[in-house]
Amino acid sequence: MIYLDHAAATPVSDKVLEAMRPYFSVDFFNPSAAYLPAKKVATDYEAAKGAIAHAIGAKASDLVITAGATEANNLAFTVINTCSALYLETEHESVRAVAKAYGGVAVKVLANGLIDLNDLKTKITDGTQLISISLANNELGTIQPLAEVAAIIRDVKINRMKRGIKTRLLLHSDASQALNLLDINVSRLGVDLLTLNAAKVYGPKGVGALYVSHDAKIKPLTLGGGQEKGLRSGTENVPGVIGFAKAVELAKEHLNGNRKKYAGWRKILLSELKDYELINKKHCLDNFVVVSFEGLDAERLIFLLEEKGVYVATGAACAASKGEKSHALKAIGLSNEQIAGSLRLTMGETNNETQIHEVAKIINEVVAKERTRLTK
Ligand code: PLP
């Protein structure tokens, strides 16, 4: 098997599983319980939260643990009092859907996938309370210039202050895809809210976190036992958070090495693949390659590649499962034919260089066969 869909899911690494294991059995106690072994679990849980927070330049008390990135994204939007939000049109569905529910307005992207900063500036009104822009896009891997967005927000805030307008303006970023490949620091990025996802960094699925700055006041989506300072009630997912912390630690440790490795593999793919159009040319995560084989049907290619043991994706895995065309590829101005023939290859820890050469060869063979079939 050659798996090139690490943007959809990553396997839990052995070291992560090992770190989690005791918390399913010997250290199973509810962290809220009063006896000593439970207090040890509570301490370990807080330390794990601290390690995750530290990796993004924050403190444990700044994080709210969630059941994945979808929940964290939804939680971020609770900062809004009245309906006024902006979101990037290429965002993951978990941002788009909640943004729309809050009356959100989409900000355009340029043909290279980067945010259209002029469009952003014209769409910010005195009522805008939240702007949501992912750090790295899940379909193209595009890395957005968040610091530039934060600078625009700063100017808007100063201008509002001068005019006595009290409405707060916050910046949220979904960093689900980026944690593994970028050095993230919340202060440097200038974000008030940041979504993290363990499932994309060789940690467990269904575990995520929302970084919340002092300026941002979120409201709970779940009411109950008052865990996570009352912001996310429900018994803590101790093994999940311990695993998340270990995954983050490993990601940080291998960040530079991995980036170099994936950039090298990306070059190999781009030079060995034939008869394709590169869609994500620049400003993207090193492990993302999006190519279009115009005139071909990517759904069919995926099926033919699977027969040869190669697993890849068309656009976002969740959009594909709903049979919808990728909204992100549409947003950057691709034609229906280009979108229909697009494959997303996302490299990761299950791969090696031999596989990358092999996958280029297999894709070339499958594509050539398809083109021959269609011309007959
Ligand atoms: N945000 C981004 C950028 C993603 O890639 C994903 C998952 O694909 C999510 C949010 C949703 O994550 P989850 O399904 O773990 O809630």
Image (spheres, rainbow, N blue to C red):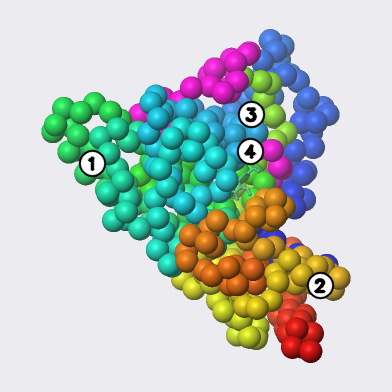
Res. 156 mark: 1
Mark 3 to mark 4: distance in Å? Answer: 17 Å
Cα separation between marks 3 and 2: 45 Å
Instruction: Using the image as rendered, state which of residue 342 and residue 335 is in the foreground.
Output: 335
**Which of marks 4 and 3 precedes in the sequence?**
3
Q: Residue furthest left?
A: 162
Question: At label 2, which amino acid type do we have?
Answer: Leu
Q: Are marks 4 and 2 in contact (CB under 8 Å)?
A: no
Q: Which residue position holds label 4?
A: 68
Instruction: Give coordinates of residue 365: x percent, y percent.
Output: 77, 84
Residues at badges 1 and 3 in contact (C-beta under 8 Å)? no
SS at circle 1: helix
- The residue labelled by disc 2 is 304
Q: Are marks 4 and 1 in contact (CB under 8 Å)?
A: no
Q: CA distance from mark 4 to mark 1?
A: 32 Å
Label 3 CA crowd tier, 10 Å (few <14, some 14–19, many 20+): many
Expressed as whole percent of the image width and height from the top left, the position of residue 153 reads 28, 43
Mark whose residue sits in front, 3 or 2: 2
- Where residue 345 sits, quadrant-wise, is bottom right
Label 2: state its secondary structure. Answer: helix
Query: How many marks on residues?
Result: 4
Q: CA distance from mark 4 to mark 2?
A: 32 Å
- Asked if disc 4 is less than 8 Å from ligand 1, the answer is yes
For the C terminus, which image quadrant?
bottom right
